Image (spheres, helix red, strand yellow):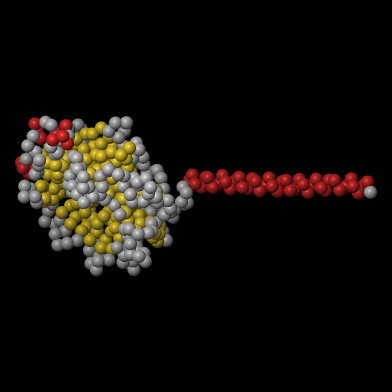
Amino acid sequence: MSDTSTKSVPDWWQRERQRRQAWILIFLVFLLGLIGYFYWVSAYGVIGNRVGVNFDTANYLSFINVDEKGNPSLYAIRADGTDLRRLTPETDKSNKQNPMWTADGKNVLYSSTNNPNQVMQIYIMESAGAKQLTYGTGNKFSPSPVPASQLITFLTQGAVKTVLLNGEDVHQVMPLPQAGHEEGGEGAVVGELRGPYLWAQYSPAGDNLAAIQSLSSEDNPHNLGSFSAGDQVLRAIVHGKNAFLDSGREVGACWEAKGKRLLCTFAEYHIPTGKDRPKEFDVSEFKNVEFVSGMRIWNFEGDKQETRSIFVAFGYTIEPRNPTWSPDGALVAMEVWSHKKDGEKVLKGIAVLDISKEGTFAVRNQTDVDSFKTMIPVTADGSPQRPVFSPDGARILFEVAKPKGGRDIWVVNTDGTGKRNLTESLKGESSQAVWTPLKKL
């Protein structure tokens, strides 16, 4: 009996050791899985590894073409005019607008009615086709990637919202929701200017947000102070604080490619009188001027907002529109519109200004208007509009509205040479072109 009892002890300990080893192994597997999960999130974000389009997008641009039957399609093409690709199937005849590449250049974002409710929703183009990101009521427009994140912004029902690239976590960022409203609701802060947002974009670092808001007397029955009903106003959330920047009948803006400066154009800023008149207009030069148009740079590098005046046009002279800023910060391209005293506005063309040196371009009278040079003038063949610098700063993309209808996409070197029609082979109207981001090697 004693011999049998002595032999059973090692067997019991052996089984206990095996059980402990099994638990340790399970724990190690769990720990390795947890490490792998956090590595995955660190590498790809919470949305996972996105599948991009099935070609190298470097030096490409995407655009919308509406054929002669009125069917819109999403296309891509190289900047030299080769390798034209239809990205949406020919059978997809839904409305399409606002193409924009993701920050890594892997996918194209755009708005489309390709859903059962025929509501404009945001889609992302992958190698297998388009994937819907947003749902619910209300048309959604103008997707734009938020740098250094997996978020995009979009416009819906007059508000600015964000969503992850997997369609989750929708939040409203402008106007800030009222207390008592659910997060992402449509409420506006009491006492702030009211009206729909028309454009929104985060700074290259993803920390500051700029947006253009349209004002109206219906939305703003109270005194607007230095603003006027019918104006557009450039606003920003900078260092977590709400800021009002420039305003006018039409406002445009773009961020500096590598910094925290914001370029703004404004047309027909009516100079307020009395207590609302800004101090900068209390000089003799503006004594008899009813309104001005111009361009300014807002610098948010430090705690204080600093401004630099780039261009000013007095009264019925010139209006700048749709600005674009070269990546090195030295050049600005813009549409130039002649504003006549009878109220008529005529496009002169696209001008390129060298702003690398201090100083302000000034247009004071009709003589200055007539002598103001455009690099891409309006001709009998068409009207150039909507310039956009390439990510490397070597070229400018623009549209040409043809006199008999339709539009084409063109590119030109920044010195005015090498003008090329990229969409000459496509019939209909080609517009809304955007560059792919400059990829990091």
Report the side of 337 relative to 32 (left or right). left
Residue under the image location 11 percent in, 31 percent down: 283
Q: Is residue 324 visible in this depiction of the protein?
A: no
Residue 47 seen: yes
Percent coordinates x, y for residue 395 in the rendering: 25, 46
> Residue 149 placed where, x, y %?
41, 45
* Place of residue 153 in the rendered image (x, y in percent of width and height, measured from the top left): 35, 49
Q: Quick one: 430 or 308, which is closer to the camera?
A: 308
Q: Residue at x 51, y 47 (%)?
A: 40
Taking 39 as reference, is 367 left or right?
left
**In which image quadrant can residue 316 be found?**
top left
The residue sitting at 14% across, 34% down in the picture is 281
Depicted 62 relative to depicted 306: above or below: below
**Residue 32, percent across and down?**
60, 46
- As displayed, is residue 76 above or below residue 299? below
The quarter of the picture where residue 123 lies is: bottom left
In the rendered image, the vertical position of residue 358 relative to residue 425, given as above or below:
above
Tell me if 373 is positioned left or right of 427 in this view.
Answer: left
Residue at the (21%, 38%) spot, across then down = 296
Numbered-mark total: 0
Q: In the figure, 262 relative to 113: above or below? A: above
Quadrant the C terminus occupies:
top left
Left or right of residue 230: residue 393: right
